[in-house]
Image: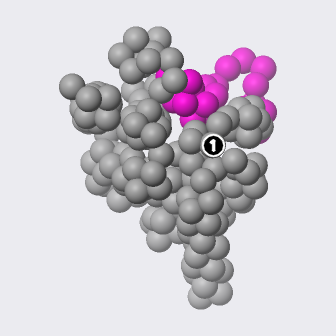
Amino acid sequence: MKLIEKAREFAREKHAQQLRDYTGEPYFVHLEEVAGMVERAGLSEAAIAAAWLHDVVEDTEATLPEVCAKFGSGVALMVLDLTDTPPMEGMNGERRKRADRLRLELAGPETQGIKCADLISNTSTIVKHNPGFAKKYLPAKRATLEILTKAPAGLVEKAWASLHAAEAMLKRYDDHE
């Protein structure tokens, strides 16, 4: 089985019972959207596979060694760079987010491109479905976008456009409250 197909099926299996926050859609819809953007941007087969797998370690029982064994160290490194730091003693949420941003800042262009696609997918629904959370989410996404300086230009531009549209939507929402 080809790498991308294998990653898609692994992600489908691991995320089978999950639903997307706010929309109630199968979580797989988000993965498909992110992988599709990465593919249309012309990124490598490894990057498309990593796009399918970008949440598998963070949100399922799958482990990084398992991802490495099944998909190779290149894909596993991208997945590692895209995986949020888990809660741990002595490391509050803000410190974890700083560690995540530093890891992403040092990541390669394709990993940063996957993150841009992830931000686009997540940002498109957040204001509509949870404006209260969007007030916290959008500034954090802006801080992340500011460090994604190596990502492919087309994905960065779309991510910024998505953020600006969400910020404008949130402002209109706040103005009507």
| Visible residue check, residue 62 | no
Q: Which residues are magenta?
A: 76-96
- Residue that label 1 marks: 109
Q: Position of residue 18 (x, y in %)?
A: 31, 39
- Quadrant containing the C terminus is bottom right
Residue depicted at 64% across the width and 28% down the height: 85
Amino acid on which the number 1 mark rests in the picture: Pro
Task: State which quadrant residue 78 falls in.
Answer: top right
Task: State which quadrant residue 94 falls in.
Answer: top right
Residue depicted at 57% across the width and 48% down the height: 113
Relative placement, left or right, of 90 versus 41 is: right
Residue nearest the observer in this picture, 60 or 160: 160
Q: Is residue 93 above or below residue 143?
A: above
Q: Position of residue 69 (x, y in %)?
A: 40, 11
Residue depicted at 39% across the width and 21% down the height: 71
Q: Is residue 167 above or below residue 77?
A: below
Q: Secondary structure at mark 1?
A: helix
Q: Is residue 34 above or below residue 82?
A: below
Residue depicted at 69% across the width and 47% down the height: 150
